[in-house]
Image: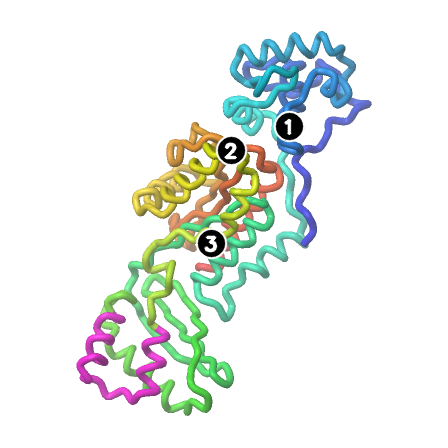
Amino acid sequence: MTTPADPTTRVDDQATRADEAPRTPGLAGRSALILREIVEAYVATGEPVGSRTLSRRLPVALSPATIRNVMADLEESGLIFAPHTSAGRLPTDRGLRLFVDGLLERGTLTPEEEEAIAARCSAEGRSIEEMLAEASGLLAGLSQAAGLVLAPKSESPLRHVEFVALGPGRVLAVLVSEDGTVENRVIEAPQGLPPSTLIQASNYVNSRLGGRTLDEVRRVIEEEIAAHRTELDALSSKVVEAGLATRSGGVSGGALIIRGQARLLADVTALAQLDAIRTLFERLEAKETLLQLLELAQQSDGVQIFIGAENRLFETAGVTMIVSPYRNTREKVVGAIGVIGPTRINYGRIIPAVDYTAKVIGRLLG
């Protein structure tokens, strides 16, 4: 896939003057330019940047002394800080927030990139869980962070179930819910399975739907099979059980699917950071956290960005979450997708990728 547009597009050296600097509430032109350069250097390298380096990077001619004065004002305003006694500065969470809200030049996806994302997320021949896991892994790769997807909890009764032969040893289970959601599950089956077995399995399951959800149908059938109160033969029973099985991390549980956790640990340089990441993972696994994540996603029509300790969901310093809700065809929020990574994540690259992936998932879920 082509790399999405770089968010740190430089201001044209010839066309920009100090009085044409970005207009950001609370910041004068020079202050906005210098804060943006500090943040962009931080995103690119993770290292503090000093006045001499800034004087070479800035698209306007400012002396190191002038830059130091502006940096002092930014530090006093709580937008940058000195990690140690050197002259270099890094952005605070507040400075990053100001950058994201007012100074960030967001990239865009090319048609080829959009097509590649849609192809990777395609649900054809895969269950919803598998499609969502692929989307999570896709964002993890794009962001070099951890990708996450909050899967929708399916509470709609099943309307129809059908088992279709795909080839030797493979059967497609098609589950259609009353709300119009269609889930395709590819399951393993014995070689040489006769068509009559799949017809018998489909008829048996459909005769027991009766307004029941997937979990309810599965429990009823499991009880019948265990008590030998079913006309199914051994092969048909295997097909039914595999087709209705509750998958690990599946949609029916409204689970959180995470890929690329190891990338979060790549930037860990201190034991305290390692403990913070471990705590983050523990909170991600908590059911209460899943509900809070969905609640946060429902509060916005688009991408939301939570930076460092300002994120009331995790309150983990040094970590950013970029998340977007995805909706079904009735515009109801049914889940969320995004990434969790270091605060120096490439915001301009990831925001459009998260936004577009959420739209793709919504279309695929129907």
In the rendered view, tell whether residue 115 sits above or below residue 208.
Answer: above
Q: Amino acid at mark 1?
A: Glu
For label 3, the residue is 362
Q: Position of residue 51 (x, y in %)?
A: 70, 15
Query: Which stretch appears magenta?
Result: 217-243
Q: Position of residue 115 (x, y in %)?
A: 63, 57
Q: Position of residue 137 (x, y in %)?
A: 53, 54
How far apart are the alpha carbons under marks 2 and 1?
A: 16 Å
Q: State whether residue 230 appears in this view.
A: yes
Q: Residue at x 78, y 14 (%)?
A: 61
Q: Nearer the viewer, residue 80 or 194?
A: 80
Q: Residue at x 50, y 22 (%)?
A: 94
How far apart are the alpha carbons under marks 3 and 2?
A: 39 Å
Q: Nearer the viewer, mark 3 or mark 2?
A: 2
Q: State whether residue 305 appears in this view.
A: no
How far apart are the alpha carbons under marks 1 and 3?
A: 38 Å
Q: Amino acid at mark 3?
A: Gly
Is tag 2's residue or tag 1's residue first in the polypeptide sequence?
A: 1
In the rendered view, tell whether residue 308 sits above or below residue 6.
Answer: above
For label 1, the residue is 47
Q: Secondary structure at mark 2?
A: loop
For label 2, the residue is 270
Q: Amino acid at mark 2?
A: Ala
Is tag 3's residue or tag 2's residue first in the polypeptide sequence?
A: 2
Q: Secondary structure at mark 3?
A: helix
Q: Residue at x 31, y 70 (%)?
A: 159
Q: Position of residue 209 (x, y in %)?
A: 25, 73
Where residue 185 sits, quadrant-wise, is bottom left
Quarter of the picture containing the N terminus is bottom right
Is tag 1's residue or tag 3's residue first in the polypeptide sequence?
A: 1
